[in-house]
Image (cartoon, helix red, strand yellow):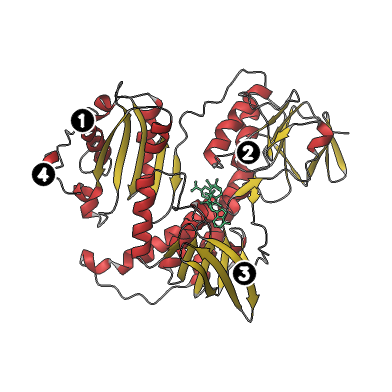
Amino acid sequence: MKKEFDVLVIGAGPGGYTAAIRAAQLGGRVAIIEKGDLGGTCLNKGCIPTKSLIASVHVLDWLKKAEEFGIKVETKGVDFSAIMARQEKIVKQLRNGVGVLLKSYGIEVIKGRASFISPSEIKVEDNTFNIQKCIIATGSIPSPIPGIDIDGENIMTSDDILELGQIPSSLLIIGGGVIGLEFACIFQVLGTKVMVIEALPRILPGEDRELSRMLERILKSKGIDIKTSARVKEMTYTNSEIEITFESANGLDKVVVEKALVATGRKPCLQELGLEHAGIVCEGGRIVVDEKMETNIKGIYAIGDVVGTPFLAHKACAEGMVAAENAMGKHATIDYKVIPGCIFTLPEIASVGLNEDEARERGYEIKIGKFPFMASGKAMTMGEKNGFVKIVADKETDKILGIHIIGPHATELINGAALAVKLECTTAELDRFLFPHPTLSEAIGQAALDVHKRATDLPKAKFRHG
Ligand code: NAD
């Protein structure tokens, strides 16, 4: 007998499985269709494996500066296969965890590729399912650049690089965005000679320019060669080497490397879905949805990377909750006002709300407050003096428009900052909040005080340098 489901979810990444669980919590009979592994890109090829690699290189980084802390250690070297095995073990454990979660809610996992036959029917391999409600959550795939042939072994995407068997002696990264720079940091610590080619005038072009400049300075000081306003003209692979010709302000240049990573962005994964059979409208390569995450076809929702940027797991999950609740007859809408962003470079960057340029472009007259970790007692004890907290506030209302952090544990610190932006705090309200001492979070309070030049852990403004 053909099984009937109230909600069919296509794609078991964080957005998809969150949506499936929420629909089941609301009493729905739910199935989730997945052609690959449970957990999607985030768990299998993105956030989790890269954070495992970063955790390993953090240990190596700490060992390198152990003497600074009065500890004498002898490092026998790096076992790259053990680093990769650890990463795979963590991914496998979490993937099994997703299976357990889904099972606990009675959600059926259907293995295979889903494609629409009509607005009311979906085919998965040889089986057909009736659609009551459907949530599309198929994520995104690497978006290569024309003229560069990715062979997966030498010229790689971020999926392929996780399959490396050895640490490359040299690595060229095309794209100074989030993925490119996280891998640049990982391989620099592992001893690879790393070069980054970024087409725009600065790395992390979407971030506050002061933070991206500071990161560029720090990465360069570690030996990462960063070329901005540069473009690859030609790439050829011969005799186990890749020869790259690129153009920058200095004209044409050549470099020879062992491996190359193309990290020039991702695009929604829509192929094979047969969206045209359901009449689902797309625009600019993404599915068009309303604030209820519903497509132009009633009862068919789309969430996560398939509906466009930012390509973030936590944004996909928030959209998944909204879509699931609407599919189950509730009335939920998405609120994009506060989406924190986290970049796991060394040092980390995290931000929420408007950056300085964005605030000015929107017509705000702004005030800025800044506090360097160099002046933080806790950061000093940790040997982490690089970085700062920057607050952008509306001059007229004192309301916080954005908080931007570069430095130790920025990706954890941003949560408190995000809450302040969400609650529409003024800087005066934030600076009266009791930040525990001694913690890195005090830097947020001091940055809030600095908006009015009242930071008590900084010298009087006129005695400051820089
Ligand atoms: P991205 O958009 O962050 O960066 C791509 C970079 O490549 C940009 O700086 C762009 O200017 C540059 N570029 C484009 N074409 C180029 C060319 N021909 N030559 C040189 N440079 C070129 O994209 P990404 O780093 O590939 O990441 C993809 C998506 O995944 C992003 O939306 C990102 O937010 C998301 N992601 C997020 C995290 C995180 O939150 N920590 C981690 C990984 C990926």
Q: Is 397 above or below relative to 405? A: above
In the rendered image, residue 71, in percent from the top left (x then y), is placed at: 23, 68
Which of these two is toward me, 446 or 254?
A: 254
**Identity, as a three-letter code, of the amino acid under mark 4:** Phe
Which of these two is toward me, 398 or 138?
A: 398
| 3D distance between C-alphas at marks 3 and 1 | 52 Å
**Identity, as a three-letter code, of the amino acid under mark 3:** Met
In the rendered image, residue 79, in percent from the top left (x then y), is placed at: 47, 73
Q: Is 392 above or below relative to 174? A: above
**Residue at coordinates 72% horizontally, 43% vertically from top-left?**
270
Which of these two is toward me, 272 or 435?
A: 272
In the rendered image, residue 156, in percent from the top left (x then y), is placed at: 61, 64
Kind of element beneath mark 2:
helix
Q: Which residue is mark 3?
A: 235
Q: Which residue is mark 2?
A: 17
Q: Earlier in the sequence, mark 3 or mark 1?
A: 3
Q: Earlier in the sequence, mark 2 or mark 3?
A: 2
* Quadrant in the rendering for residue 269: top right
Q: Which residue is mark 4?
A: 463
**Residue at coordinates 43% horizontally, 58% vertically from top-left?**
55
Q: Which residue is mark 1?
A: 452
**Identity, as a three-letter code, of the amino acid under mark 1:** His
| 3D distance between C-alphas at marks 2 and 4 | 54 Å
Observer-side mark, 1 or 2, equals: 1
| 3D distance between C-alphas at marks 3 and 4 | 52 Å
**Residue at coordinates 76% horizontally, 25% vertically from top-left?**
297
Q: Are marks 3 and 1 in contact (CB under 8 Å)?
A: no
Q: Is residue 404 left or right of residue 177?
A: left
